[in-house]
Image (tube, coloured by chain):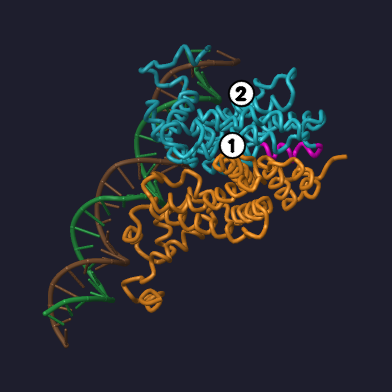
Chain colours: A cyan, B orange, C green, D brown
Amino acid sequence: MSRAASNQNNATSYHHGNLREALLSAAVDSIREQGAENLSLRALARVVGVSQTAPYRHFADKNGLLVELARQTFDELSRVTSERIDPALNCADNLLRAGEAYLRYAIANPEKYRLIFGSSITQREQYPQLQTAARSAFNVLLQLMAEGAQRGEFLPTEPMLLANNCWSSIHGFALLTIDGVFARKEQPLGFDDMLRVHLQMTLRAIQHNPQHIQQNLPDAIPFSD
Amino acid sequence: MSRAASNQNNATSYHHGNLREALLSAAVDSIREQGAENLSLRALARVVGVSQTAPYRHFADKNGLLVELARQTFDELSRVTSERIDPALNCADNLLRAGEAYLRYAIANPEKYRLIFGSSITQREQYPQLQTAARSAFNVLLQLMAEGAQRGEFLPTEPMLLANNCWSSIHGFALLTIDGVFARKEQPLGFDDMLRVHLQMTLRAIQHNPQHIQQNLPDAIPFSD
DNA sequence: ATAGTATGTTTTCGGTGTAAACATGCCGCT
DNA sequence: AGCGGCATGTTTACACCGAAAACATACTAT
């Protein structure tokens, strides 16, 4: 609010006043439209109305800008998932709720989701902020697994193994959906039902008590006979 | 063998004689080393020893070359998975076998695997050969699901829903592994065991009879107590 | 008021994809 | 055998990109 707001969009001023945020915002628009692969710093500069090298005052290079976007995306993922976890509910339901939030975020923001996992960003290991944000997002899941295992809802094994499985399953579903790989016209269900069925099966993979399975399944998975 | 072989590597000949295959081979090397994002047609031409626009005689554009590589990769995936399916075995075991072959191929060829799903290739819908190859690979899984459901090994629901779940789970695991996202030093198991545990859980998600679950699990999933 | 510094610009380099016009030489037909 | 057409490769050219270096501007703290 202090300086940036007082100066933003003043066409005659030499200093933009808000360039960093303006670039990030334009970058989000750009990757939404053409993907992170096609992001051009020069094009961003043009959109924002600034010289082609001005972005380098705010980001070491193109990769640096992408890293910042990815960091924000991990934080948003942490938020939407942890928001849906309610300590009053059991872990199975919390997994379904957080999983659905995760998938809906990924599918609503496909290019941002691709960005945080894809290979557009290089040398991730050199950006500790990025590692930290990613780890925080994973910890939401890991903690849920630990609690579920402890409470006997999930298999009594290492929470890391449970988390790896859940994350793989949900991550894979997100990407296959985003990439349009599921042949939509051949699907027996609409997308919302598909999503819930997938999450139910994902839960089933790690649930401990078979009677839970018998109780839960018929609600969500349509049987053929 | 006919003309290409008789003329290959003749340094003095104007015509390369083998350019298409030489480019594809060089492209595989290149994406193995630097990823598909960094593939440069000009660099390929240089490696092969040909002018920078010669590749355009064999591929409409860079995307066309990548599409051909992707098509080959899908075919290889179809082969390695279907090779491991043995009609004499039950469907659960066949899923574990084919799943392991799929994962090992993906992990041994990370850049090729990324290529076939990532966004390096654009306008996939314009390449029917690519769609066909992808569909063939998926059909290996889909047919296994149909048989498993019919035999009562898997949940009695639409094979497509079973296949979506398995594929998501295995695909997600492959990508998280390839992308180095699993924090390796925090894993309680070595990679081979991690892989088998994941496949067991993936199977568990769709297995019908709880007693199968009780039988199968202790073999592969280490319990904490 | 002014010095220092953060920010933005100009210029320049080497790299890329790819279109257009041109050169070469293999293959089939007479 | 010779010749013409066509597949294949080359030259040249253009517009774009990331990024480094030297320079210009104006905000901020003293």
Image quadrant for the C terminus of chain B?
top right
Q: In this picture, is A86 found above or below A50? A: above
The tag on residue B33 is: none
Q: Which residue is mark 1?
A: A225
Query: x%, y% of residue A75?
Result: 61, 27
Q: Which residues are magenta?
A: A156-166
Chain under callout 1: A
Determine the residue positioned at 36% across, 72% down. B17
Query: x%, y% of residue B87?
Result: 62, 59
Query: x%, y% of residue A173?
Result: 57, 38
- Residue B197 visible to an observer of this rendering: yes
Compare residues A63 and A90 and report the one nearer the observer: A90
Label 1, secondary structure: give it: loop
Query: x%, y% of residue B155?
Result: 64, 40
Find the distance from the CA under tag 1 to the CA under tag 2.
Answer: 37 Å
Q: Which residue is mark 2?
A: A80
For marks 1 and 2, the one nearer the N-term is 2
**Residues flagged by tags 1 and 2 on a common chain:** yes
Name which residue type carries label 2: Val
Compare residues C2 and A97 and report the one nearer the observer: A97
Residue B173 lies in magenta, yes or no? no
Chain under callout 2: A
Report whether B80 appears left or right of A44: right
Determine the residue positioned at 70% across, 31% down. A141
